[in-house]
Image (cartoon, rainbow, N blue to C red):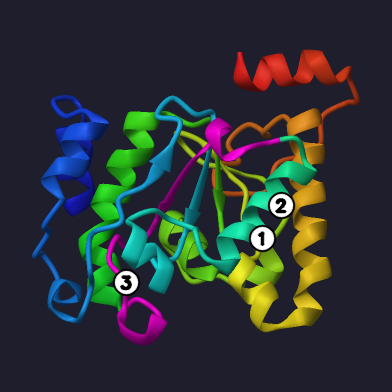
Amino acid sequence: MLADRALHTVAIMTLQELSASLHDCQRCKLAKLGRTQVVFGVGNPHADIMFVGEGPGFYEDKQGEPFVGAAGKLLNDLLKSIGLARSDIYIANVVKCRPPNNRDPEPDEVDTCKPFLLQQIDLIGPKLVCSLGKWATQTLLNRPVSIMAMRGKAISLDRFTLFPLLHPAAALHQGNLRGSLEEDFKKLKAYLDHPPVPAPGAAGQPTSPAPTEPLQSSQMRLFG
């Protein structure tokens, strides 16, 4: 029901207006648990690729921008490694306020913020949404998931393709995951170079690889 109301609001609200409406959001308990400010999102408002993380951390809460701490620096490096820059994409989080002590967001907090994330996605209109970590992935799939089982696979949904990736913070906290995260981004580049063709009636399922074709042609088809 909340998601339906959020989608209805899209028709009469711009991205800037949505951001302004959440400027001092008091809709869940995170507003009273030490947040400095709402961290709405940043980047190209017409991006074909959107990245969605879990929630703001310490530095994000202070600066009001997603992914500006150590995990953000790693994300920037990974984007550069596949020929992307932050100016090419849009970045947001599932929850817009920092959970205390960087704990996981709680179900009621996710439920409160999810409609606004869906509005962001609809207003930006990305063709590809890259979910960073378990929370973003299961929020957008609307079911519990294992990120290790889902990572690096394109999933065709109704309005966009979802591409789950490990969260950069996980690679920083568990050094053995750094190679897995870099592998995820290599798979993302391969997808961008040669987008798979979704199988008929397979929404919510990993897509099948397309026949190899020239890089320029395949990118034009995905982003044209």
| Residue position for label 1 | 74
Task: Inspect the magenta stretch and tell me whether residue 92 lies in it.
Answer: yes
Task: Describe residue 216's horizontal placement relative to residue 74 as left or right.
Answer: right
Is 170 or 154 nearer to us in this picture? 170
Q: Residue at x 39, y 63 (%)?
A: 60
| Circle number at residue 98 | 3
Q: Residue at x 64, y 50 (%)?
A: 76
What's under tag 1, amino acid-wise? Leu
Provide residue 186's location: percent of width, then percent of height. 82, 48
- Magenta-drawn segment: 84-105
Query: Which quadrant of the figure has residue 44?
Result: top left
Between the residue at mark 3 and the residue at mark 2, the CA separation in whole angstroms equals 24 Å
Provide residue 7's location: percent of width, then percent of height. 23, 37
Which one is in front in this view, the residue at disc 3 or the one at disc 2?
2
Is 53 or 136 nearer to us in this picture? 53
Tell me, yes or no, whether the two marked residues, 3 and 1, touch with CB atoms within 8 Å: no
Provide residue 10's location: percent of width, then percent of height. 21, 31
Tell me, yes or no, whether the two marked residues, 1 and 2, touch with CB atoms within 8 Å: yes
Instruction: Give the SS element for disc 2.
Output: helix
